[in-house]
Amino acid sequence: MSRPELAVPFRERAEQALKDDFLREALTIATTKFIGLRREAFDDFPEGEGLRDRAREIKEATLQHLDRYLEQLVDAVERQGGHVHYATTAEEARAIILDVARRTGARLAVKSKSMATEEIHLNEALERAGVTPVETDLGEYIIQLAHERPSHIIAPAIHKTKGQVADLFAREVGRKVAADPEVLTRIARGELREKFLQADLGITGANFAVADTGTLVLVTNEGNGRMVTSLPRVHVAVMGVEKIVPSLSDLMVFLAILAKSATGQKLSSYTTLVQGPRRAGELEGPEELHLVLLDNGRIAQLAGPLRESLYCLRCGACLNVCPVYRQIGGHAYGYTYPGPIGILLTAMLEGPGSVKELAHASSLCGACAEACPVRIDIPRMLIELRRGLDEARLAPWPERLAFKVLGRLLRRPRLYRLAAPLGRLLQLPFARGGTIRRLPLFLGDWTRGRDLPAVAGRTFAERWTDLGRRA
């Protein structure tokens, strides 16, 4: 499915974001708050580090036997009256959901927050099929009104200030609206309440699915998730195959660290456990439940270089601490998943060629790996991506040439020693006060957004040699 924003190179998207003062203000406020809340949550939770290790072990052990756990999940869901569908691609997933909508005569679908449905571009497909999708998560509702895509994994409208949201709601309701979160929430609640009662179809994601019980787990901070799963006649859940956990006891490990990593809470406000459609004698719940298990490139990475990215809990902690994301926000990345983990997920879903620019949109500072609740080594995989792009000759030729020359230079001490005086000579027209602020030709890309240190007057090796002579 075409994405018009991708027609603009990443560098230009990033530069546009850097010029947006409202965006920078909103990102700074929100990510700083998230970072502080996460730090406080784990400081008060001495078991947290051990649980992070345990969660990582569970993820790896589950991936090693993913086929077995998927079969177990399918059996458990179907035993309780649910229907399970397997989608190899995003196209297949959309076709499955549209078939359910047509068969049940759905005309209005209410949705709770789901990155999986964003990944498969479901809303556009529903609209073309004559089904009106309504996002009921407050952040997603804001984004839908603005005709935008989410810019954060857990906070879709993180890039908007209160004033911008108030202006958006004012256009929707036709009157002036105060830039007050309580007022804005009350307006959204009033607009959405009837939608829950009118909807034929409820669509959700799933944070986890428990293999041995067939339980779908939704972790939210708004009550909309429970209404989406209980009021419409039909419930469709879309879930990446990697979200499966073996047992309820394993689930508890993830619940103990997920909210702390995402929002600094002990637990999210709502943890909804769904087991099959409504049974005889029950007062609420759907008549039909459909679980769509989404592959879309995931299975191929079980033996691929991005395997560790399948551990991701979609908590967004790596985005909050990333110095690149905090400056440019999510839309500049151009794809569904932004931030450091988003680069890896994009490479998994769209192929390595899709991230030939994004692979370099990281300082490799390691803050993302430190914040990740399952300790995904994002910097290592980004380096592997860069190496792969170079080997596949997808990186720009000047970049490949520069790194090839530098690599040979660093492996040959004699050449390296000769290069130091040559570098001092070549930098004379550009070095001022120990800094190089501008380079010519294609090397100018290196100094467009950064200053480089000048080659030192004396290298460490030269100083060490002098110290040896004096001794």
Image: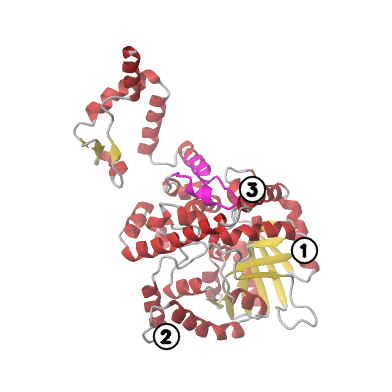
Disc 1 and disc 3: Cα gap in Å?
24 Å
Kind of residue indicated by mark 2: Val
- Which one is closest to the eye, mark 3 or mark 2? 3
- Which one is closest to the eye, mark 1 or mark 3? 3
**Quadrant assignment, res 179:** bottom left
* Relative side of 294 to 38, left or right: right
Query: In the rendered image of this protein, does residue 133 appear above or below residue 339?
Result: below
Residue 230 part of the magenta-drawn span: no
Cβ atoms under marks 3 and 2 closer than 8 Å: no
Disc 2 and disc 1: Cα gap in Å?
44 Å
Depth order, front residue of 61/387: 61
Considering the whole magenta stretch, tell me its main secondary structure.
Answer: helix
Q: Position of residue 192 (x, y in %)?
A: 53, 82
Kind of residue indicated by mark 3: Asp
Cβ atoms under marks 1 and 3 closer than 8 Å: no
**Which residue does the image show at 47% across and 65% down from the upper left?**
150
Q: Nearer the N terminus, badge 3 or badge 2?
A: 3
The label on residue 173 is 2
Depth order, front residue of 340/101: 340
* Relative side of 394 to 248, left or right: left
Kind of residue indicated by mark 1: Thr
The span shown in magenta is 364-386
The label on residue 53 is 3
Disc 3 and disc 2: Cα gap in Å?
49 Å
**Which residue does the image show at 36% across and 55% down from the upper left?**
14
What residue is shown with label 1?
Answer: 213
Q: Secondary structure at mark 3?
A: helix
